[in-house]
RNA sequence: GCCUGGGUGGCGGAAUAGGUAGACGCAAGGGACUUAAAAUCCCUUGAGGCAUGUCCUCGUGCGGGUUCGAUUCCCGCCCCAGGCACCA
């Protein structure tokens, strides 16, 4: 009988579905295990990255289930987003239609992979029954001041025709459009006050032992907490005061100028009527045209303009000039900085350029510094000089003393600053959840009353051919009445950032049909937190940070009991493949290459480095084609076998072939020996075994032990699979050897075969179900327990001991397992090879490691 | 510049608590079966050396160190990937 993956896989998928084997409900008797993979954006087809991600998850889900856990393993759709709008314009269709068609297609692809999802819990974030609860939470946030609106400078992407959050800007470019430079616009936006939770989110970075260190490091850096002080600089000839944030209050006596960020609102009033007014205003205008990333990048030149005004250094009481400078960030600290050119490199360069005075206030321990000869700022530790009462103090100590001094004089105060900014959630897009707010000329900004939720996104409107949201042009949507005064009013036409939906979808999976609130507390409390979350590293900041924030918001609203959404996080590596490039036709798909030549022109192909699979590089492999050719099991197996999950996976067509060969070997092992094993029971450990039969029995149990540890402790499926391969090799060796083939032998062989099938079943469930059934079992493997190993089976009577002389391996001997150190040492010294290396020399020392080695030092 | 990872055969990778480096797989070479091919099975395969062996020497990015013994621990460096970056 030939291994026919397609037929058997479809058969078992149908049976799993028919018997509802993946459905799960709360069961207080069982230990729960919530396993979650990051849900996909319904782009149309699944790609190899999805396949890898979801295969890893499915193995864990199936394994935990066999270990008796009550496993929640849901799947859904991150269904709002810009690609739907773009595709709709391109195909003259509608985002909703495009999205739901894609969902249907991808769902059938996922089913074809045999993933054990409880599809009853499926959700799509574009469903009003989902986003209505998000709107409700928005209203609560608004009430508590956690959502607010402000006019501010925002990052704008022309390609998206919308605002981006700070997290969505990468190197000054849009995260979705690497070719699109982000520009700065001043506009009204809605914000979530994530900064209120900055401290807690940061603190809990130390309480997430199940997260990869690098993700936590990235988050800590992103939050960017620093300790410092606000120092108040009075403006000369005015009542105004300029607040400056610094972490280096120890250098206050060296501050010889002050700089504003160009966006700073105080600037305009300061320069009003000054001779420099025109110059300053034109500088501001010029600077703000350039995005803050560009203008603050390493390569851009530090520039500034004198405002004509002075302020007073509160420590020295001297008047110092006020500048506006391109390198000062408006949204960090107070948007103004004090300039200490002697001890800050940026300030040094700026002062040199504009000939501002320098004053050394920290003296290096080993030399003197003079202002005239300095070539760069001195940023190391040292002793304070020119600092009034603080002279002679170490600068690290002066940080505290000067902070005290400032506070006592009312010239400033200690503070903590974060790099993290509030989350801008307004998007000027159509395909998103409407922000439930109404603007009334008389009553101002009015929340949509709870009873009027959801604010449904209208589906019966046409996309605008040039992109941009149609909502502001759709009176039937935006025209409404004010809930307070009943007068004419206008709806908010911005929608929410799609990261809002993905910040709580995992909570909603616990009760996807609940219609009396966002969450059914009983169910959410049973399942949350997610025990294991699996997804790509690219979400290390965006999605994971937002989710940690939103979880706390829901907790504080009484919707959730947990502090953290994800107890353990596994970030899987990318799927990579080498690129193929034709000198004339550019990147080529694999099918456009034959025998190392371009099928279009016959040119030699240039094989490039292995990089992440992407359509633009055309180095992609379509999972569907592979499934057609080899079956889902082979694809699953290769994804797991090629490398451990957190590392990048190097795609290899031959590797896939190898996985397929192995499954065929397993298939033949069972089918070709079926008659012999069917009429014996699995060896139960009662009869004495000897020789190779004993060895085979031991190998079965060693394999159980190894595979269990590999999956349980570290998700190293590649070594788990290797171990099963070794077991299969050993059975085949026994079968082709001269060992006994009596009933007892077949019982031990049957044990090895069943162990193989059981251990492989989370990885390649279809073929295993089929083989399991052939072996005479009626129940699905989904309901069978994971095998246990027996200590007795692992016992050996002889052990291999390596003999070293001076740390070099010279011989190997077998000794009875019962031997003590002395007996092992005595046996080692008897070795002829050891003797020949020791001959004539004085033995200085003998190290004996039981069961491992003897090292003789001469 | 700072912070994370990582560097092991021709390739993907193993070595989980300092104890036989290279498991398992791929590729390559040789052989068996076959009229032939595919499939399958068996053998060889880190480098070098010669005395061809249960042989010797070298070998886990580089240079030191600790240790009887280091891919593993420590110090200094190089390279690669990712993140942050004029954050005051």
Image (tube, helix red, strand yellow):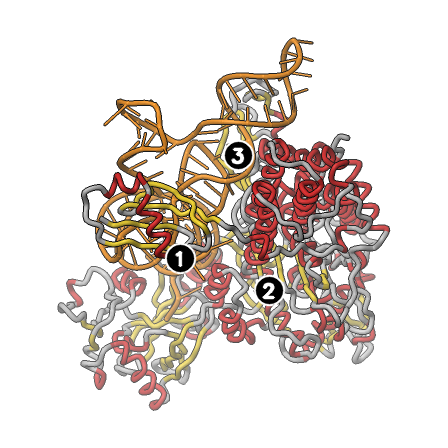
* Chain to which the residue tagged by mark 2 belongs: A
Q: Is residue A621 visible?
A: no
Image point (74%, 52%), residue name: A116
Frontmost residue, A130 versus A421:
A130
- Location of mark 3 (residue): A578
Q: Residue at x 70, y 46 (%)?
A: A754
Question: In whole angstroms, how far apart are the C-alphas of marks 3 and 1?
Answer: 55 Å
Circle 2 residue? A187
The residue lying toward the viewer, choosing from A840 and A194, is: A840
> Which of labels 3 and 1 is toward the front?
1
Q: Nearer the viewer, residue B53 or A522?
A: B53
Residue A339 located left or right of residue A549: left
Q: Is residue A26 left or right of residue A501?
A: right
Residue A242 appears in which quarter of the rendering?
Answer: bottom left
On the image, the x and y values in percent for residue A713 come to 56, 58
Residue picked out by circle 1: A820
Q: Secondary structure at mark 1?
A: loop
Q: Work out whether A22 lies above or below A90.
A: below
Q: Is residue A721 left or right of residue A477?
A: left
């Amino acid at each position: 009988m030939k291994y026919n993956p397609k037929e058997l896989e479809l058969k078992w998928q149908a049976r799993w579905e028919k018997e509802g084997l993946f459905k799960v409900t709360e069961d207080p008797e069982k230990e729960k295990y919530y396993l979650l993979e990051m849900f996909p954006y319904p782009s149309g087809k699944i790609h190899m990255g999805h396949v890898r991600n979801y295969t890893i998850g499915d193995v864990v889900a199936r394994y935990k289930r066999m270990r008796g856990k009550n496993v929640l393993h849901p799947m859904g759709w991150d269904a709002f987003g810009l690609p739907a709008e773009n595709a709709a314009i391109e195909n003259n269709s509608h985002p909703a239609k495009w999205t739901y068609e894609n969902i249907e297609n991808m769902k059938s692809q996922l089913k074809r992979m045999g993933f054990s999802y409880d599809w009853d819990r499926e959700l799509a974030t574009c469903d009003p029954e989902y986003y209505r609860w998000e709107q409700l939470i928005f209203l609560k946030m608004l009430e508590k001041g956690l959502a607010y609106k402000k006019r501010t400078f925002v990052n704008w992407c022309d390609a998206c025709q919308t605002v981006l959050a700070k997290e969505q800007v990468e190197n000054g470019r849009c995260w979705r459009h690497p070719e699109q430079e982000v520009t700065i616009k001043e506009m009204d936006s809605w914000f979530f006050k994530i900064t209120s939770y900055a401290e807690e989110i940061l603190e809990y970075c130390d309480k997430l032992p199940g997260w990869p260190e690098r993700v936590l490091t990235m988050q800590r850096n992103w939050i960017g907490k620093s300790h410092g002080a606000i120092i108040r600089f009075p403006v000369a000839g005015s009542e105004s005061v300029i607040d400056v944030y610094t972490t280096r209050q120890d250098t206050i006596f060296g501050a010889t100028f002050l700089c504003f960020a160009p966006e700073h609102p105080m600037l305009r009033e300061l320069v009003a009527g000054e001779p420099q007014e025109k110059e300053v205003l034109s500088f501001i205008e010029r600077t703000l045209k350039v995005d803050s990333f560009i203008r603050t990048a390493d390569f851009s030149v530090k520039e500034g303009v004198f405002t004509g005004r002075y302020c007073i250094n509160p420590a020295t009481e001297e008047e110092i000039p006020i500048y506006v400078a391109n390198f000062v960030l408006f949204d960090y600290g107070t948007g103004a900085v004090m300039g200490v050119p002697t001890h800050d490199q940026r300030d040094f360069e700026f002062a040199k350029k504009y000939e501002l005075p320098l004053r050394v206030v920290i003296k290096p321990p080993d030399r003197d510094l003079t202002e005239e000869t300095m070539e760069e700022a001195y940023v190391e530790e040292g002793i304070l000089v020119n600092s009034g009462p603080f002279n002679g103090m170490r600068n690290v100590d002066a940080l505290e003393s000067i902070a005290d001094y400032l506070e006592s004089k009312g010239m400033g105060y200690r503070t903590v600053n974060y790099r993290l900014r509030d989350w801008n959630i307004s998007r000027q897009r159509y395909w998103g959840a409407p922000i439930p707010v109404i603007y009334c000329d008389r009553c101002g900004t009015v929340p949509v009353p709870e009873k009027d939720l959801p604010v449904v996104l209208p589906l019966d409107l046409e996309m605008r051919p040039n992109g941009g949201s149609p909502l502001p042009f759709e009176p039937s949507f935006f025209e409404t009445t004010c809930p307070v005064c009943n007068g004419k009013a206008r709806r908010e036409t911005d929608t929410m950032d799609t990261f809002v939906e993905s910040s709580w979808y995992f909570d909603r999976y616990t009760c996807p049909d609940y219609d009396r609130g966002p969450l059914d507390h009983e169910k959410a409390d049973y399942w949350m937190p997610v025990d294991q979350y699996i997804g790509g590293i690219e979400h290390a900041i965006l999605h994971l940070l937002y989710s940690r924030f939103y979880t706390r918001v829901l907790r504080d609203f009484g919707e959730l009991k947990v502090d953290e959404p994800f107890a353990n996080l596994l970030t899987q590596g990318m799927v990579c493949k080498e690129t193929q490039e034709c000198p004339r036709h550019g990147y080529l798909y694999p099918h456009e290459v034959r025998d190392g030549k371009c099928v279009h022109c016959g040119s030699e192909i240039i094989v490039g480095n292995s990089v992440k699979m992407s359509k633009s590089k055309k180095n992609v492999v379509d999972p569907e084609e592979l499934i057609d050719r080899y079956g889902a099991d082979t694809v699953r197996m290769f994804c797991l076998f090629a490398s451990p999950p957190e590392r990048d996976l190097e795609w290899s067509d031959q590797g896939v072939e190898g996985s397929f060969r192995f499954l065929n070997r397993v298939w033949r092992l069972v089918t070709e020996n079926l008659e012999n094993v069917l009429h014996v029971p699995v060896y139960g450990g009662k009869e004495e075994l000897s020789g190779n039969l004993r060895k085979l029995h031991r190998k079965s149990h060693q394999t159980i032990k190894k595979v269990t540890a590999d999956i349980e402790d570290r998700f190293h499926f590649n070594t788990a699979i290797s171990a099963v391969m070794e077991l299969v090799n050993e059975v085949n060796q026994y079968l082709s050897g001269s060992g006994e083939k009596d009933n007892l032998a077949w019982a031990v062989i049957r044990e090895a075969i069943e162990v193989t099938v059981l251990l492989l079943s989370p990885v390649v469930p279809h073929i295993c179900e089929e083989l399991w059934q052939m072996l005479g079992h009626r129940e699905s493997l989904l309901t069978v327990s994971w095998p246990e190993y027996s200590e007795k089976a692992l016992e050996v009577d002889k052990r291999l001991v390596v003999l070293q002389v001076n740390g070099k391996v010279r011989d190997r001997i077998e000794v009875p397992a019962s031997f003590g150190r002395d007996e092992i040492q005595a046996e080692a010294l008897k070795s002829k090879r050891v003797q020949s290396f020791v001959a004539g020399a004085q033995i200085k020392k003998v190290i004996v490691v039981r069961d491992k080695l003897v090292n003789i030092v001469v």
